[in-house]
Image (cartoon, grey):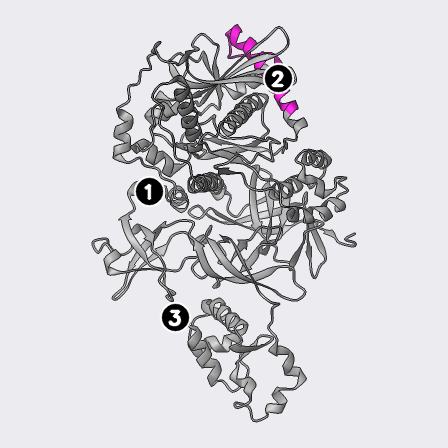
Amino acid sequence: MKIKKSLILKVLLSASSWISPKEIREKLKVSKDQGPKVKSILRKLVIKKLILQKENLFAHSDLQGGHRHKNKKNFENHRFKKYEKPSFREYKIFEGRFIATNKGFGFVNIGKAKSDVFIPQGDQNGAMDGDLVEVRAFTKPGKNRSRGYIQKILQRSTSKMLARLVRGQRTTLAIPINQRNGVPPLVILKDDDQPNIESGTLVEVELLSQLENDNELYAKVLQPVSKEIRGNLGFNLILTENQIRSEFPIETQEEAKAFSNRVIYDASTSRVDQRDLGFVTIDGIKAQDFDDAVFAKSNEDGSWRVYVAIADVAHYVRPGSAIDQEAYLRGTSVYFPTHAIPMLPENLSNNLCSLKPDVNRLTLTCEMLIDSAGWVQSYRIYESIIRSRARLIYEDVAEFLDTGLTRTIRNKEILDSLIVMNDVARALEVKRTKRGAINFNFEEQNIELDDQNQMVSISKKFSSSSMKLIEQFMLEANEIVAKHCSGNRLSALYRVHSSPDLSRLERLKMVFQRFNIPVPPNSLIDSGQFNKVLESIEKLTNKNQLQIILLRSMALATYETTNQGHFGLGAKYYSHFTSPIRRYPDLVTHRALKHELHAKLGINPSPNSNTSVLMAEYLSEQERRAEKAELESVSLLKVNFMEKFIGQTMEGKILSIENNGFCIEILPYHIDWYLPIETLKDDNYIFDEINLVLQGRRTKRLIEAGNRLELRLTRTDTLHRLMEFDIIGFPPKTLTSMD
């Protein structure tokens, strides 16, 4: 039986007195698991003043008029009158992203330094994880946490999903596989069905637009799920949820196959021959798409001439081609621990455009004259051809730079060049830090896999000297290109990172005071002050948590059609230029540069991209989808790894605490995992956002970062990337003073 507002109103109208949600449920003859739905409808009816609430009892508003009570006077006495007021303060309407949980409830992240809005089970209104929604939020007197319900879905996070087809006598339904989405069974109409597909089959469906004044959600059956996908359902669920395109269309593949694998230099062109320079690539051991090659040499006056050569993808991928259209739809390559899903077909990404050693490759070179203090004195950007001397690995280069010894690199010219490039990188880093670049120092996860691509271990590591070398070279080239494009009004895309909203820094003011951090929060509008804060918290137990708070106070970096600077880098100009194999915005910038170069040379200009605000917004969104998918794939590997430990106890350490839960490190395996606050079953815990602790209401127990705890793994779900733990015990401190 479907629960409707009209049915509940009918029950209340027929009742002669106040009744509980349980009694309402019994009169409706619905099961216990429908209790949250009944309560949700009751809450909405109270807000609309259609019914009355007295503690946990409800009555129809007609009861207030007295015609259902013989003693009207008694009803209107002071005792009852106080319940005429709504249980919640005046509501506010916000927009934000819905975050679903496996427990059925969720939260809406509304940003603006405000706490997330709690959404109880049954109040999602068909919203899925990641949807942009409009939420009506309320705050109870004496409570800090807002709760509310979703009244409108503004934008779906995904249109396709995996579901189980269930055929009834009259209705065909699709039951979504992803429990986090919180999506009810989807109705399949006759015109949107494929009747030849049997009931129980796993299918891919497309969510259709919701009809006006219709609570049902409808979907169209696209295709049954293949055996290959079923065998790796957890991973493919990630692809579907995040709309990651994994297969190239036939026309795209055919277009890629048509290119010759040989690159021949034509001396009659304007392309500069740099095959005699000592370019090398430095990448991770698993990398196959080499976007960039670097080289540097010293000058007698202490300055350096630095060359950053980037794959000339725009030479091959023309606007409007099948490859270009598919690359735009993808927006970026997606890098999972097990494999990559490239933006371009592999014949281009891993072969023709990849700057492999000892072969000719077409490039765009950014040549810079840099003084001893790291400042660029002059630059040139031009088309070129190079021949990389070696494909170097981060670990091998770091070993040489850190120790002066090497077991793998034998070429003396390359070793000498690495020393020079390292000197340049250090000068660039010092300059960038003095200028205000923010240096967060987060550990990176290093996942080890076996032959079956299953995780066998995970370790933590910081950025190495070789990684910093490449990072500094790429940052400098990106800045120079952005400055050039902005100054010449080229049709490029810029990487913009806005300064924090001052309102977001208000919370930090009290947090800093609590931890004796001697930096006035208002000064954080200057990026250089962030580093002073980071230095102040370096040795604190709450270091990770404070870094996260600082990071979240900042805006997200986005792509824009106009240059607005990059707050985090302390840069007036910034764009993405150095990775056109894996990022579409870089390709757009390359086209703008080549168009200008050809026009100046008086030759037929290379085709340009028509940039727009819509393009910038779309590519920003695709980047976020890719990052989310990458993180979820790591979670999937962690759950697969931990599955064999169900029932076992293990030690953990609390890393950070938030309003709705806390992040722990499972110490034996160095696995980070987020636990909802409901995992703490011994008490009702309240988050103190100033002291960054959880405090039990009854026991006054204090839980904070650094606490050790004993855990038992009780359940894993590889499909939905879920792990559940019981907390056996830990020694939390007892709170005596909060000042």
Q: Residue at x 34, y 21 (%)?
A: 604
Query: In what quadrant of the picture does the N terminus appear?
Result: bottom left
Which mark, residue 2?
3
Mark 1 residue type: Ile
- Per the rendered image, the range of residues in magenta is 403-431
Is residue 257 placed above or below 153 in the rendered structure? above
Residue 339, above or below 195: above
Nearer-N-terminus badge (1/3): 3
Inter-mark Cα distance, 2 to 3: 68 Å
**From what the image shows, is residue 101 above or below residue 442?**
below
Residue holding disc 1: 229
Q: Position of residue 688 (x, y in %)?
A: 69, 53
657 relative to 68 in the view: left or right: right
Q: Tag 3: Cα neighbours inside 10 Å, few (<14), some, or many (≥20)?
A: few
Q: Residue at x 44, y 62 (%)?
A: 125
Task: Look at mark 2 in the image and give the residue it sits on.
Answer: 402
Q: Which mark is residue 562?
A: none
